[in-house]
Image (cartoon, rainbow, N blue to C red):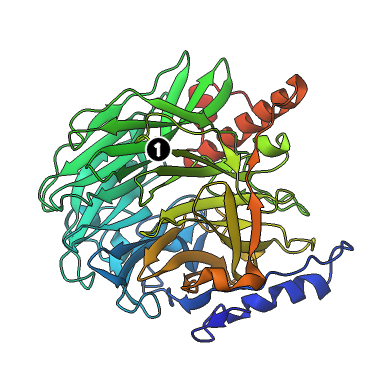
Amino acid sequence: MSELASCGRWCCVGALWLLASCGGGGSDAPAPSLPVALGAAFPTSSGSPIDAACTGGSTTGTLYIDAEVEPFVAVNPLDGAHLVGAWQQDRWSDGGARALMAATSFDGGRSWARQPLPFSRCAGGVGAGGDYERATDPWVDVGPDGTMHAMGLGISGQAFQAGSVSAMLAVRSTDGGRTWSTPAMLVRDGATLFNDKNSLTADRTDARYVYAVWDRLDAAGHGPTLLARSLDGGLTWEAAREIYVPASAGVSQTLGNRIVVLADGTLVNVFTQFDTVAGVSSAWLGAVRSADKGLTWSPPVRIADARGIGARDPQSGQPIRDGVQMPSIAVAADNALWVAWQDARFSGGARDAIAVSHSTDGGNTWSAPVAVNKNLGAAAFTPTLTARGDGTVALLHYDLRTDAAADATLASTWLLTTRDGTTWNEFAVLDPFDMANAPVARGLFLGDYHGLVSAAGTFVALMGVATGGTANRSDIVAVRMPANLAAASTAVGRRAVTSGAPVDEATDARLRAATHAAIVRTMERRVPGWAARVGANPP
């Protein structure tokens, strides 16, 4: 079982399998063998610091007070024990949260100090951050000089409705994350445009440069990639501008933009592109490159088709709002690029696996996708990648292999590692937990992503877990993996990758239809009414 730093509010999660198997309404299916969790887990979030009466002016949806979701984490390159994380605090069912929280650790994730980021009214937002009812999409990074950066999306009202506003906001910290600056506003738009799904990257080769990217939708559903740059370590920002305008015969947009920096300073921005043509939506992963610190960008390189369908509880059919169509990218020690995403091609459209592709030439060409998760018989979702200096690439994901009870949605968490991209070792991260009581945000929701870093010789994850209770539906935990993973043989499963074999015409048609339906669900969760705007057929 997991070593717990303390019996925090979520310490019961290791017993949830027993409850799900023995409680009323259970399935007659045999109980799967449970993984032996290796991670040492440390509570990271705590009780909500937000005034219980504060709504920020919002009046729609269900508010899940004390529910924390969608964490991300970064490590200080000057000190591997110094981490910064962020997450959504008090999630709303119909979008965003009351606040974004930041947390810092100076002991490798064992203990954390928390403070609200000033991006929303309920978080005590100041300046540009004081105008927004809700905040979402937290992101953090640390520059090579130790300056910490955080970014979020401030929103008021529902997208494209009268009076609605969306704005990208950034702050910096020069004291290790103890205090944060007044927010800088990178862009702000009203009801005719909607900014979405941001990420921020500190240039590891030059502390002066910080990059923020996101997509911006117009009323017809077109969504170019926007970039804002800072040339002075986040003190000031250039005006946001389009760096990639997707095009097809129909309506196109990007989602999940994220920049990484190669050793020579080249920038690579990876994204998912949605194309809706004649009522049918499809997706593919692409990348654009910049050799001049983001001034100019290359034409897109196609990495692979994106054929994710999203996860559901296999017993109840309850949808899970996961990271489908949200790629993760990492740069390895040898400067190779790795991208991971959810993809159902390996099962003919039955369920998502974790697909991986890599590039050894700076993103100009990419390998054919392969499935790397061990159990292809269960839906796997929300992958995130990182790499460390000894050449190890690591991938963190959830899956549903332990789910068997009709009244539970039992999720397991796994860390995969590789040196060659061909054979991957698998390690259980946490005891299985029941997602059935996670916040419902048009699907059971722990986040579109989570965080994973290499820190002081080990891997540290920042993850959302469902607690099993309704008063406090989810928490954020930091999980430290053993420094010597190879010695933990009881939790290791080795397997070679699985290639996506050619499929017959009927299977391909089913897969395309399932992908179309997943894209519509993904975008309707983000922007209700999206399908009508782009002319997408009902799934």
Quadrant in which the N terminus is drawn: bottom right
Query: How many numbered discs sit on the rendered protein?
Result: 1
From the viewer's perspective, is 529 left or right of 149? right
Residue to which mark 1 is pinned: 360
| Residue at x 37%, y 29% (from the top left corner) | 364
Measured from the top left, where is residue 369 in percent x and y? 56, 36
Residue 407, above or below 111: above
Q: Secondary structure at mark 1?
A: loop
User: Front-most of 25 and 405?
Assistant: 405
> For residue 415, what is the image quadrant?
bottom right
From the viewer's perspective, is 353 left or right of 146? right
Measured from the top left, where is residue 14 in percent x and y? 65, 77
Quadrant in which the C terminus is drawn: top right
> For residue 72, what is the image quadrant?
bottom left
| Residue at x 16%, y 61% (from the top left corner) | 145
For the residue marked with disc 1, what is the amino acid? Thr
User: Front-most of 386 and 470?
Assistant: 386
Measured from the top left, where is residue 170 in percent x and y? 23, 53
From the viewer's perspective, is 432 left or right of 65? right
**Residue 60 visible in the displayed image:** no
From the viewer's perspective, is 256 left or right of 201? right
Residue 300, above or below 133: above
> For residue 500, what is the image quadrant?
top right
Residue 218, above or below 101: above
